[in-house]
Image: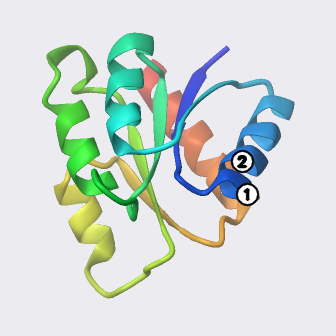
Amino acid sequence: MPRILIVEDNEENRDSLSRRLQRRGFEVIVAVDGKAGVATAKAERPDLVLMDMNMPELDGWEATGQIKAVPELAATPVIALTAHAMSGDRERALAAGCTDYHTKPIEFPKLLAQIEAILKSADA
């Protein structure tokens, strides 16, 4: 069962996404901010990270960089989640080390397809 770490400061978003992924058979770990996300990724070694990019203190851009800097986590896929779909954000997310990018509000079927495609390619 793939383990997904959700790093999201909005409780409603975090809970909704967590429940939906659990119903699909994923094991879900949650972190409430970027700092906790980095620590949880180091401790739990998830198969994939869903990273909110706009959080106070340590944002998703910096948290992703810190996760990717850990040799054991460097290959861990990260999907950037952001409500600020500005021109260049996708490129910025990929440059920060994210594997893919998804805009909010989350379109769950699309996000699920992204997750499954990334996990399938990681297994190949």
Q: According to the image, label 2 marks what residue?
A: 17
Q: Amino acid at mark 1?
A: Phe
Q: Is residue 55 above or below residue 121?
A: below
Q: Which residue reaches farthest right?
A: 23
Tags 1 and 2 touching, CB below 8 Å: yes
Is residue 124 something one can see in this rendering? no
Question: Which mark's residue is nearer the viewer, 1 or 2?
Answer: 2
Q: Amino acid at mark 2?
A: Leu
User: Looking at the picture, how far across and down is residue 83, in whole percent?
Assistant: 51, 75
What is the crowding at mark 1: few (fewer than 14 residues within 10 Å), some, or many (at least 20)? few
User: Quarter of the image containing the N terminus?
Assistant: top right
Q: According to the image, label 1 marks what residue?
A: 108
The disc, 1 or 2, on the residue closer to the chain's N-terminal end is 2
Distance (Cα) linking label 1 and label 2: 8 Å
Q: Residue at x 81, y 39 (%)?
A: 19
Left or right: 91, with 20 as reference point: left
Quadrant in which residue 27 is drawn: top right
